Amino acid sequence: MQPFYMVMEFFDIETHVIKMKEKHPKWTEKQCRSLLYWQKNLNKKLENNANEFMKKLSTKNIELVKTPEAMGINMFETCKNVGVLLERNPKKMVIKIVIIAIRKDKS
């Protein structure tokens, strides 16, 4: 198995919902949780941090996997194996993850 790295960004959705309810008292819980208001910034931060990490690696034979689930990777089990417990339908903390994979040498 080739080595890989996971880069994670955390977003406190619980605090965000509280702030949105204060700002928009008539909004529903669903409106306050809407990813339209926070996901773009979180994704940008995650991508920037992943790119910075990739610059530090000693190889150029790397690939950034932005949607590992789309490649059939079970992120809940993968993260559990390294001690990170992901919450399904998070109420407190959203964890966004990308994988930095080292491509297999073709020799």
Image (cartoon, grey):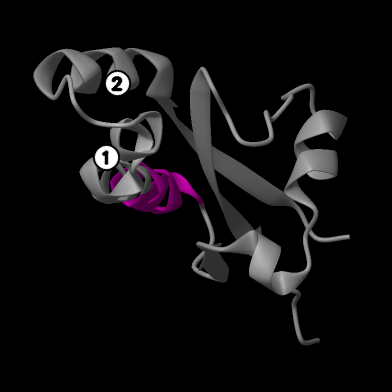
* Mark 1 to mark 2 CA distance (whole Å): 9 Å
Residue that sits furthest to the front in the current view: 26
Magenta: predominant secondary structure element? helix
The residue that appears at 50% across and 31% down in the rendered structure is 94
Q: Quadrant of the N terminus?
A: bottom right
The 10 Å Cα crowd at callout 2, few under 14, some 14 to 19, many 20 or more, is some
The residue that appears at 50% across and 22% down in the rendered structure is 93
In the foreground, 21 or 55: 21
The 10 Å Cα crowd at callout 1, few under 14, some 14 to 19, many 20 or more, is few
Q: Residues at badges 1 and 2 in contact (C-beta under 8 Å)?
A: yes
Circle 2 SS class: helix
In the foreground, 64 or 70: 70
Q: Quick check: 9 above or below 13? A: below
Q: Pointer 2: what residue?
A: 16
Residue 10: image quadrant is top left
Residue 90 is marked as none
Q: Quick check: 17 above or below 46? A: above
Magenta span: 47-57
The residue that appears at 54% across and 61% down in the rendered structure is 59
Q: In the rendered structure, does residue 54 fall within the stretch colored magenta?
A: yes
* Residue 103 seen anywhere in this rendered image of the structure: no
Residue 38 is marked as 1
Which residue type carries mark 1? Answer: Trp
